[in-house]
Amino acid sequence: MALRTAGEVCRGGVAGMRRFPASARTWYLARRMSSAPPPAGNLPRHVGIIMDGNGRWANAQGLPREVGHERGADSVRTVVRAARKLGVDALTLFAFSSQNWDRPPHEVYHLMALLRRYLIEERGEILDNDIRLVTVGETDRLPSSVREPMMELIEASSENSSMVLCLALSYGGREMITDAARQICRAVSAGELEIDAIDPELFSSYIESSRILPPLDLLIRTSGEHRISNFFLWEAAYAEFFFTETLWPDFTREHLLEAFEDYSRRERRFGLTSGQAAVAAAADAKEEE
Ligand code: FPP
């Protein structure tokens, strides 16, 4: 059965997504206009997760690393379902980095097989729950065994609007920024773009994720590591970070709620003063009435 959340009613799903604007002020104003507070407190609209610790989880149980990835795929199912029920607009999962291609070939093979299985087995639940699948990364590097079910589900879910599930596949933040810079240089060389027109807002429009996702609010990393590992380097500029010791295969709905609870206590100022942020929050609340 399709799940319904109060969030989708209040916010009109993902239709109102805005791009990352040029300055803190325009960013802040655009955000005020685009993001209504969720009904149950301050819920992040876009959550990114660095799903780390599958290998250590398996090691601790005396199992092969592949089993850790399989349990990790189970956590993916749990977390997607929980995020949808809670009313998150977009969830991005860092499932395979540009650097992961250099892992042992049998591990890469196993991860690709897991991705394929996930896309096939979860198709029904994703569609039934009005979830739209998108990807970021160099997905043309993926084998056709993954690309085919992936493209099919992207197409089949393209009209869905209750939550965006974004899989970061063959993804690297530096690679995405480099790609944007390359495209901008081409546009300048072709005389289509003035150098002086290049500002953060314009640059952002060349970053793949900015075209399909709202600004990143919360970045979660599991397994006790405190680094970003080439994920969402551009997007994380104003994101809140949540680090947990929990290994990804042990990550449950309760851990997600803990991260959201922690997030709801943060004061996000976007370079403004605390006083300005309070005024903005009051204006937001008024607009919502
Ligand atoms: C990092 O753990 C995790 C990965 C490189 C892959 C993540 C993949 C999954 C969670 C499963 C498949 C994904 C989907 C969307 C079905 P690690 O192997 O680096 O762990 P370690 O640091 O403990 O060795």
Image (cartoon, rainbow, N blue to C red):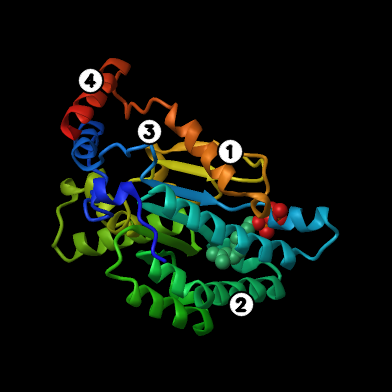
The residue under the point 44% across, 64% down is: 137
- The residue at which mark 2 appears reads as 113
Disc 3 residue crowd, few under 14, some 14–19, many 20+, Cα 10 Å: few
Residue 184 quadrant? bottom left
In primary-sequence order, the first of circles 1 and 4 is: 1
Type of amino acid at the residue the image marks with label 1: Phe
Q: Amino acid at mark 2?
A: Ala
Say which element carries label 2. Answer: helix
View extreme (right): residue = 62
Q: What residue is shown with label 4?
A: 279
Q: Earlier in the sequence, mark 3 or mark 1?
A: 3
Q: Residues within 10 Å of mark 2 (few under 14, many from 20)?
A: some
Place residue 266 in its image quadrant: top left
Marks 3 & 2, CB-CB < 8 Å contact: no
Residue at image position (21%, 48%) is 198
User: Label 3, label 2: how many angstroms apart (C-alpha)?
Assistant: 39 Å
